[in-house]
């Protein structure tokens, strides 16, 4: 049952990303460096003695080199050392494991388990003889016999006795960061050859070239990574930093109001309902009601939420505003002894003392 939904959604991800992080080792050196902070040095994947140094500025180019005879490149020391005392992550993997094509005996469009996935989330899609690596959606893992993504309760993921290193980390020095190609507020970090996903603190995002989180206003995201939609903080009381719950006037329009629900998991409601009063009515915070706009004090533009041409002005019952396109375009003053009456659209000798214009 899960097959259709799990795989459909992942096909999309696989084709959209091509598994950039999973296939890090197969990228061009320029594309690898695009994911890494400037001036990062790494072991060239699938070799023991070649290194790559990423550009240290936008103008510079990628530099590549090879260790002198008898030496291997140590990614953590960042230099070549005697091969006998070096540990090469690609040795033993050999050509077989590395270049093994798990799709060799598969029909086009089939799914096979990804043996390099230690948490069972990974699978391989065989497409036109090529292997496209992808992961099952959150909370799902790949079931090798049904060849589909299933819930963790439906399949027991065998724990590998030795923690496998993540392919993306094999060639990178410890604690190297990689940009997340999708989310600019996240990044990856290789710690002891395991790939960890990290989130930037609130209002900051990951700068791909600098390799750390900076203020959202000055971040240079990885080219395909997007910033999250700004969070709706209406239900966050800025003075106290805590959530507020209930009905609240919209601070941009007297004709609208919000309903803030109870916080979830300690977090204020980030999707409050935004509602409108009927035409001619304003939200009254004290009565928690929509009512005749003349009975509501409104310090905002009173041309909002009405189709009248002339409106009363807050705090001055002799003045009026002229509306056009839902905004006040000019103001005027009734002759001495006259008061503006929005209901009759004119100046009147009677002062109705509307709350809307009273001081
Ligand atoms: C494909 O089939 C051949 C011949 O049966 C076998 O030697 C090879 O290991 C198979 N490849 C994979 C990836 O299973
Ligand atoms: C990698 O760095 C972390 C600290 O950030 C350290 O705890 C760990 O032991 C290091 N791993 C290796 C293999 O050096
Ligand atoms: C981020 O930048 C904005 C706009 O330049 C500024 O108002 C804000 O204080 C900055 N935030 C931090 C945490 O530096
Ligand atoms: C304003 O809206 C009301 C209710 O929809 C309508 O009856 C009235 O004719 C409108 N007035 C103008 C000037 O458009």
Image (spheres, grey):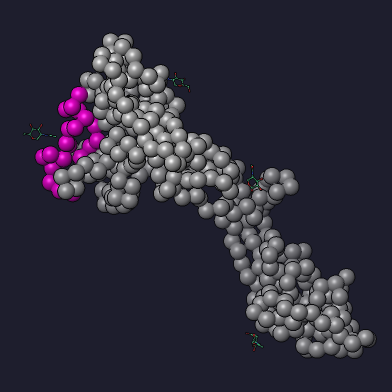
Q: Nearer the viewer, residue 57 or 159?
A: 57
Q: What residue sits 37% from the left and 25% below the top? A: 193
* Direction from residue 126 to residue 32 in the image, left or right: right
Q: In this view, does 17 lie above or below 325?
A: above
Image-quadrant location for residue 355: bottom right
Image x and y of residue 31, in percent = 34, 40
The outermost residue toward the right is 337
Q: The magenta stretch spans which residues?
A: 94-115
Q: In this view, does 268 lie above or below 326?
A: above
* Direction from residue 256 to residue 264 in the image, left or right: left
Whether the magenta-drawn stretch holds residue 186 is answered as no
The image quadrant where one finds ligand 2 is top left
Image x and y of residue 9, in percent = 32, 51
Is residue 44 visible to us here? yes
Split into 4 quadrants, where in the image is the C terminus?
bottom right
Image-quadrant location for residue 27: top left
Image x and y of residue 134, in percent = 30, 42
């Amino acid at each position: 049952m899960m097959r259709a939904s799990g795989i459909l959604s992942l096909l999309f991800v696989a084709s959209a990303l091509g598994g950039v992080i999973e296939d890090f080792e197969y990228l061009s050196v320029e594309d690898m460096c695009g994911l890494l902070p400037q001036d990062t040095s790494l072991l060239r994947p699938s070799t023991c003695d070649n290194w790559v140094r990423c550009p240290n500025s936008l103008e510079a180019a990628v530099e590549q080199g090879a260790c002198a005879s008898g030496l291997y490149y140590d990614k953590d020391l960042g230099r070549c050392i005697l091969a006998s005392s070096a540990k090469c992550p690609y040795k033993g993997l050999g050509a077989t494991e590395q270049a093994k094509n798990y799709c060799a005996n598969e029909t086009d469009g089939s799914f096979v388990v990804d043996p390099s996935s230690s948490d069972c989330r990974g699978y391989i899609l065989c497409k036109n003889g090529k292997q496209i690596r992808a992961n099952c959606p959150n909370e799902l893992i790949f079931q090798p016999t049904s060849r589909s993504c299933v819930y963790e309760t439906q399949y027991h993921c065998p724990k590998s006795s030795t923690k496998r290193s993540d392919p993306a980390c094999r060639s990178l020095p410890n604690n190297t960061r990689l940009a997340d190609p999708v989310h600019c507020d996240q990044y990856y970090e290789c710690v002891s050859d395991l790939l960890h996903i990290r989130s930037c603190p609130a209002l900051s995002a990951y700068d791909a070239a600098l390799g750390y989180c900076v203020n959202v206003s000055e971040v240079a995201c990885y080219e395909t990574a997007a910033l999250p939609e700004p969070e709706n903080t209406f239900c966050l009381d800025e003075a106290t930093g805590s959530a507020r719950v209930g009905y609240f006037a919209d601070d941009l329009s007297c004709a609208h109001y919000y309903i803030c629900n109870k916080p979830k998991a300690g977090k204020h409601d980030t999707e409050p309902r935004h509602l409108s009063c009927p035409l001619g009515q304003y939200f009254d915070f004290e009565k928690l009601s929509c009512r005749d706009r003349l009975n509501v004090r409104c310090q905002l533009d009173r041309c909002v939420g009405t189709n009248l041409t002339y409106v009363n002005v807050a705090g001055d019952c002799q003045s009026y505003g002229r509306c056009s396109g839902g905004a006040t375009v000019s103001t005027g003053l009734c002759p001495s002894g006259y008061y503006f009456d929005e209901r009759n659209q004119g100046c009147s000798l009677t002062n109705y003392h509307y709350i809307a214009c009273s001081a």
